[in-house]
Image (cartoon, rainbow, N blue to C red):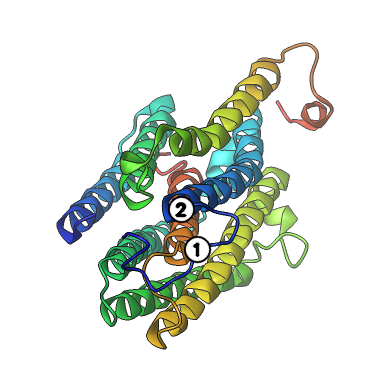
């Protein structure tokens, strides 16, 4: 990887950091979290593809790298599918929640 | 780099240098996958609490120091660029440049920990540390849950960074005294670990510092 590529990535990361911090002060209601997480995913992809060299890696290495994130998404999705949509049957920890 | 031009012997269990490189790279990624799930469980818990407690939870996040947090993110992103420069210059055969880039990486890592410790000190003075001095009557129980997450997540991240700083310092010394030569994977693998710790922070940053800034 060339030095020019590294510092272009660095510039993109710093600009995205400025964008995400600025976006947090713009009232978007429920969209502030998705916007900041989307920018975080783009920043992570820059680090993964360039700094961690996945762009130049074989498919097997990329599959190993993707596996952890894939299982994490399954864990968060299935957890959320239950806990985030409970109304009558509340989780034990949820029963103390003030409404 | 081919075996013929490298003075470094490959592991006895490998037929070629390329095979060794791929095997150790896969091993590192398998370890990093466990780390993704380790920090991922914390983030999943955060998302649950954020959905359950809504505005009260987000209001607690507003008490974090957004200027210090943003500056620290810039420090860590820059350290990753320096780490990438160390790997590139090392594999290109340079002797002095990788040592300097590794020193820059370790110093930026220390700067990150120093800024983080400053935040922790400010939060201690504001009586925001659960189990130590959290002011429950002033901030409420939901804020305490946020700060339990905050100290677990930032503490575990700082621990990972201290391990990274130790590895990078060790690497700089080994390359500096000539006992590590290009062809092996040690530098690249420690680079992968460093960049991974950076990625964890990339996700912790918006969850901790950017929540509730408009309310």
Using the rendered image of the protein, determine whether residue B54 is visible from the camera's viewpoint: no
Residue A92 picture quarter: top right
Q: What label sits on residue B154 in the rendered view?
A: none
Q: CA distance from mark 1 to mark 2?
A: 7 Å
At numbered mark 2, what does the secondary structure look like: helix, strand or loop? loop
Viewer-side residue, B148 vs B138: B148
Q: Residue at x 39, y 37 (%)?
A: A58
- The 10 Å Cα crowd at callout 2, few under 14, some 14 to 19, many 20 or more, is few
Q: Residue at x 30, y 47 (%)?
A: A50
Write down the chain letter for disc 1. B
Residue B172 picture quarter: bottom left
Q: Are marks 1 and 2 in contact (CB under 8 Å)?
A: yes
Report the residue that reaches farthest toward the top.
Answer: A88
The reply, left or right, for residue B110 in relation to residue B94 is: right
Q: Residue at x 80, y 23 (%)?
A: A91
Q: Which residue is mark 1?
A: B10
Viewer-side residue, A86 vs B153: B153
Q: Which quadrant is home to the C terminus of chain A?
A: top right
At numbered mark 1, what does the secondary structure look like: helix, strand or loop? loop
Viewer-side residue, B190 vs A91: B190
Report the residue that reaches farthest toward the right.
Answer: A92
Viewer-side residue, A96 vs A55: A55
Q: Position of residue B50 (x, y in %)?
A: 60, 34
Q: Position of residue B24 (x, y in %)?
A: 53, 53
Q: Which residue is mark 2?
A: B16
Using the rendered image of the protein, determine whether residue B38 is visible from the camera's viewpoint: yes
Q: Which quadrant is home to the N terminus of chain A?
A: bottom left
Question: Which of the marked residues, 1 or 2, is nearer the chain's N terminus?
Answer: 1
Q: Position of residue A53 (x, y in %)?
A: 35, 48
Report the residue that reaches farthest toward the bottom.
Answer: B177
């Amino acid at each position: 990887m060339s030095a020019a590529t590294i510092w272009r990535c660095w510039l993109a990361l710093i600009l995205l950091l400025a964008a995400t911090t600025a976006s947090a002060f713009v009232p978007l209601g429920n969209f502030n979290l998705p916007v900041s997480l989307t920018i975080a995913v783009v920043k992570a992809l820059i680090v993964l593809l360039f700094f961690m060299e996945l762009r130049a890696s074989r498919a097997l290495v990329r599959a190993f790298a993707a596996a952890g994130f894939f299982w994490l998404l399954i864990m968060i999705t299935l957890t959320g599918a239950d806990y985030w949509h409970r109304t009558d049957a509340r989780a034990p920890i949820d029963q103390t929640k003030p409404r | 780099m081919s075996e013929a031009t490298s003075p470094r012997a490959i592991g006895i269990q490998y037929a070629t240098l390329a095979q060794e490189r791929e095997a150790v790279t896969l091993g590192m990624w398998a370890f990093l996958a466990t780390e993704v799930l380790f920090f991922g469980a914390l983030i999943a818990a955060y998302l649950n609490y954020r959905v359950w407690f809504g505005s009260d939870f987000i209001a607690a996040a507003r008490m974090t120091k957004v200027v210090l947090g943003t500056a620290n993110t810039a420090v860590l992103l820059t350290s990753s660029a320096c780490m990438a420069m160390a790997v590139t210059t090392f594999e290109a055969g340079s002797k002095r440049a990788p040592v300097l880039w590794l020193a820059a990486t370790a110093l930026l890592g220390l700067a990150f920990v120093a800024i983080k410790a400053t935040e922790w000190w400010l939060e201690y003075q504001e009586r925001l540390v659960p189990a130590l001095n959290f002011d429950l009557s002033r901030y409420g129980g939901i804020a305490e849950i946020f700060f339990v997450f905050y100290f677990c997540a930032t503490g575990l991240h700082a621990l990972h960074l201290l391990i990274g700083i130790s590895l990078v310092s060790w690497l700089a010394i080994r390359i500096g005294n000539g006992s590590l030569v290009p062809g092996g994977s040690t530098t690249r693998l420690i680079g992968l670990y460093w960049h991974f710790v950076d990625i964890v922070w990339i996700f912790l940053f918006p969850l901790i510092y950017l929540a509730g800034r408009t309310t």
